Image: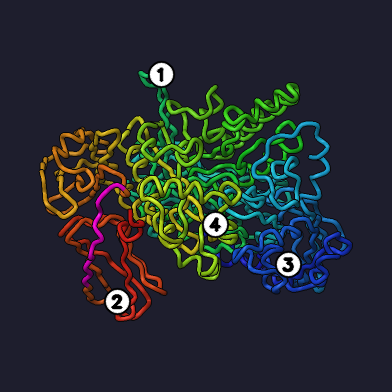
Amino acid sequence: MKRWAWSVGLVLLLALHALPAGAAQLRAQWSFRLLPGNAQLKAHPEAGQWRPASVPGSVHTDLLAHTLIPDPYAGAPEAGLQWIGLADWEYQARFDVDAATLADAHAELAFEGLDTFAEVSLNDRALLRADNSHRTWRARVDGQLKATGNVLRIVFRSPITTLLPGVQAMPHKIAGNYPSPYGDEPRDAMVGNFVRKPGYHFGWDWGPRYVTAGIWRPVQLESWNAQRITDVAVQTLALDARRADLTVAVEVDSAAPRNLPLSVSLLDPDGQVAATVQQTTSLRAGQQVLSVPVTLDRPQRWWPAGHGEQARYTVRVVADAGTADEAEYRMRTGLRTVELRRENDARGGQGFAFVINGVPIFAKGANVIPFDMFPARVDPARIRRELTAARDANMNMLRNWGGGYYEDRAFYDIADELGLLVWQDFMFGGGMQPGYDPAFRANVVAEARDNVRRLRAHPSVVLWCGNNEEETAWKDWGHGRDLKAADPAFAERVWQGYVDLFGNDLRKVVAEEGLGVPYWSSSPSNDLDTVANDSTRGDKHYWQVWGNPALPVQAYLRETPRFMSEYGLQAWPVLRTLDGIIPAGERKVDSATVKAHQKFMAGEGNQRLLQYVEREFGTPRDFADFVYLSQVMQAEGIELAALHHRASRPYTMGSLYWQLNDVWPGASWSSIDYAGRWKALHFHAKRFFADHAVAALRDEGVTRVSLLNDLQQPLKAQWRLRVMDVDGRQLSQQQHAVTMPALSALDVGRFTDAQLLGRADPARTVAVVELLEGKRVLSRQVVYFAAAKDMQLPKVQIDSRWTQGGDDIVLELRAAQLARGVWVDFDGMDATLDDNAIDLVPGEPVRIKVKADAEFDALRNALRIRSVADAMAVQ
């Protein structure tokens, strides 16, 4: 029987991802210090002594645990912590090994995450040198282990000091991302693009610069005798509702030539055996793949959210059953087909649609960035919180963005469970890469193979994408033009290296290892076609709203892509999330601490944010109103874009806004803040991504009404259009029966302002458009005919009424006049609401379910309600 020893920290994953039998923790005592002789010791001698360390972890979190540095998120300590990224660090583990493991013929150490330039030795004998944070590094340790007193030593070299001399020596530099404002790295010689380390550690426009080091994923010790099963993969050859033809590929490492009895079973989602195949196979010594054909009748297929169940099978492989060398491997997977459909159309364009099990899926969702600056702090509970929030907001796809790291298996297990499709970038976040260097490319290919194989069992993964924005940066942002002007020959080498890496190498890895999942070379792109960021072909990133030239949000309605994979507007977190982060006295738009938590435009991004807030609402009275109005602006603007994308189906087949989550508590484009609290945008997303929705989109004096049905069944419904003033006086109404086809956007009317308003005052009038099923309102939108600052919005008395039955608490809100952007929270306490950030139509109640740990009376007394009219300065 083979034996496995696993590092502290892996236990949390055992319930989420099947592991070989016999898993056990490596019982080791870890310690760390600043490497003796390092230049940083003079200024930081306190970091030079051995102290206990946590593994998985990082230097920053270990220093914080010993109070050697302040909280990297609170206040503005960032500049004073850049020395950590310039230092070399040493980690050490002391551990014993049991007699059974020592008796095994083979042993291997596997390091799932070394960040990044690491020199590893065991008992004073060199094992390996690592130079890629995204790879698993393995070393045989047969005969090197002893019963007691083993010492594992890992030295981490600073990526900045390691790479900077070579980068500075380049006559012409390739484009980087965000230059450091702190002097730890020259602005004209950035090293981030030359190292295989999470790019966001070098700073981004939504997070700080903390260049980490450490053992950020588990270290494993595995031992075995006759053989071990190293991997299992399920290839779908044919799949429909009647039958599945599969090949189960079993990778075996055999110590010697022999005959191997092998059993492969598939257990259905209820745990019942659906199929079993037994065979005896001749093995040669070494690594090999055994192919076992399996057929299932009436398979249960895996579907994305909203389209069916998320059925998953357990694959159980047993070798040498009942013997001392028995080896077992279990894994879970779902059965589905995936296609990236790119059909040419009559207009000369080309579609971009994900087709799952033969059904075209409109992709609704957001981009995901890392959940923390220090990845080892992210546990499955944090991942589940954010991914469940995505599913609760009716999302069915997340794009795992390329400037971070390949997520833990927990991320994909939870995505599988929730039915969230995953667009997976390879870890290239921007700028340009040294793909002209064969060693760099070989390193990346090994990284890609590691991660595609690690994640390919997950039915949620439906695309592998080469990088984020590198092709468009080269072609559209001046990166290529500038380098061609400086050194044409070098520019040609750089571009050819790009094509070799992203056009050929990674495509080949996905084709060989990805089990049929499609590959896309960059986002945005048309897969290396001439134009990189095209609205008629491929996927689109649209930043002319918010970015340059900072167009009004109505410009979203004039941009109709085939698939919108990035667009966004900023907002600040919920104020409660800033408690302990930004002191009350510092809560001003231009304070040093506030600017330290606003990374866009190197801290000046609040001016851009104010520009968008002031266009619609005027100047906020104070910081609290600025935060609130930033969220209303963000939510309304992204809603406009997302509904336009959905209303443009089937020309447009995806809308992924930037971004779902935060890496720390600061201003960003997220809809969920760092503490997991929903901003106004996330509540809006729950409504504008609903399977059935109405899109009432007003632009240049015309309102277009569309009805949206993302399900595979038609819907009989009614749609209603009412025009009323802010006091609730109805001026007109029309209502129509309609059958909404499956998987459709149905255009039902276009109305000019003159048709809707007549002689009514646009400053006091709105249109209310609703989708109804019987008396139930499925979806509602309020159309405004003037900017909020130009309207006569009354300061409304909002009445609240509580009902309580069992565990259910319901808050009913009602107002006699129109209330825009109504926000409910509870002073000093948290509560979960199933709706918020709403427009109250005069006289019509809205019921919100509330969950909280607080006593009912305390919750009721803490209730706070505000609306847009409360937050705007007197005009």
Which callout, 2 or 3, points at the residue further toward the start of the chain? 3
107 relative to 778 in the view: left or right? right
The N terminus, quarter of image = bottom right
Query: What residue is drawn where x is 52% and y is 47%?
Result: 400
In the displayed structure, 682 sits above or below 363; it is below
Q: Badge 2 is on which residue?
A: 860
Percent across and percent down for residue 562 are 41, 31
- Residue 280, label in figure: none
449 relative to 119 in the view: left or right? left
SS class, disc 2: helix
Task: Give me the C-alpha separation between circle 1 and circle 3.
Answer: 64 Å
Which callout, 4 or 2, points at the residue further toward the start of the chain? 4
SS class, disc 4: loop
Task: Give me the C-alpha separation between circle 4 and circle 1.
Answer: 49 Å
- Residue 590, label in figure: 4
Task: Give me the C-alpha separation between circle 4 and circle 2.
Answer: 35 Å
Q: Mark 2 or mark 1, which is nearer to you?
A: 2
Residue 799 covered by magenta stretch: yes
Q: Mark 4 or mark 1, which is nearer to you?
A: 4
**Type of the residue with mark 4:** Asp
**Type of the residue with mark 2:** Arg
Percent across and percent down for residue 781 are 25, 47
SS class, disc 1: loop
- Residue 101, label in figure: 3
Q: Mark 4 or mark 2, which is nearer to you?
A: 4
- Residue 348, label in figure: 1
Stretch in magenta: 790-801
Residue 449 covered by magenta stretch: no
